[in-house]
Amino acid sequence: MVDQLRLQLKSITRQYDFYSKQKIVLKNNLIGLLDQTYPGINAMFTSTVREDGSQKWVDFVTIFWHVECVTSLSLQAFTEKYQKWCYRHKYNFQPAKPKQIYDFSKTLISLLSKHSVTKMLIKQSVSHLNSVAKIIEQLRCEMNQVASQLPEYKVVLEMTGVGVSLGPQLIAEIGDVRRFSNRGALTAFAGLDPGVNQSGTYEQKSVRTSKRGSTQLRKTLFLIMSVLMKRAPDHDSVYCFIQKKRNEGKPFFVCMTSGANKFLRIYFARVREHLATL
């Protein structure tokens, strides 16, 4: 049963990764179109992604797809229309926001005219992006539900930098940690073990990581390290280790790789200890 869950989880995470890449492409495509009709409007919104995958800036450009959709109105008319739009889509209405958007829009110059063909292209782009975003959120929910049935789930999610998205991906890529005889075997599986450069009596002491293991696991670990760097939790041993390396003048990638290696060793110890008690 557990082995079947692990297979299911890995299949879901691979689909999640596939659609996440598609989302990035579609998002960049939409921004590219908007650069010609309403440049920089996406940066005016900072709202996070909703549970259904929708985002405020994407919903906004569905209606206000061209800068003239705003500038052709008076500030009062736009404010009223924007307020109704917020209530209709259940977004919080901030009284100062309409003027901020309006003033910003007045400074812009669009490359493409306000034409029905341009409108069609943007609406199609929004539709495709929203469809993929919805699939991603469904997969995120499903992989978290499957991962929660595995014995190490709770222990993994308690680790700093790991959440309901990265946690299941980490578990899926590592699998049953008991299949690794020691911590070195796990780091070798991730391709974070030092490479070898020797010939005869010569042996280089400082060698790059081998990168012979799972590229997907290394990607997940790098994302976790990125979360740690953003949150900067002073109490976390991995974050402190990365900062120590940075203070020593090590290159950024070396610091992140060293942090991932340390994180993986802690993961091995904690999960093995937990599974031994079951």
Image (cartoon, rainbow, N blue to C red):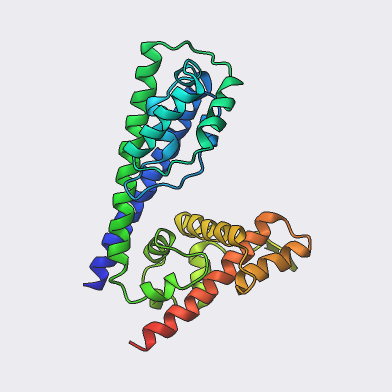
Q: Quadrant of residue 56?
A: top left
- Which residue is at a point 40% across and 39% down the rendered structure image? 23
Q: In this image, 227 relative to 60: left or right?
A: right
Q: Position of residue 201 (x, y in %)?
A: 75, 69
Q: Is residue 2 above or below residue 26?
A: below
Q: Quadrant of the C terminus?
A: bottom left
Q: Does residue 200 appear in the picture of this structure? A: no
x, y (%) of residue 45?
Answer: 50, 39
Circle count: 0
Percent position of residue 238, x then y = 61, 70
Q: Which residue is at the far left?
A: 1
Q: Residue furthest bottom?
A: 277
Q: Is residue 124 above or below residue 221?
A: above
Q: Is residue 28 above or below residue 139?
A: above
The residue positioned 50% from the left and 63% from the top of the image is 190
* Quarter placement of the N terminus: bottom left
Query: Which is more toward the observer, 8 or 103?
Result: 103
Residue at 42 percent across and 31 percent down: it is: 82
Q: Residue furthest front?
A: 76
149 to the left or right of 247: left
Residue 151 visible to the viewer: yes
Image quadrant where residue 176 sits:
bottom left
Measured as percent of width and height from the top left, residue 183 is found at 52, 76
Viewer-side residue, 182 vs 198: 182
Q: Image point 65% across, 70% down: which residue?
A: 234
Nearer to me, 251 or 51: 51
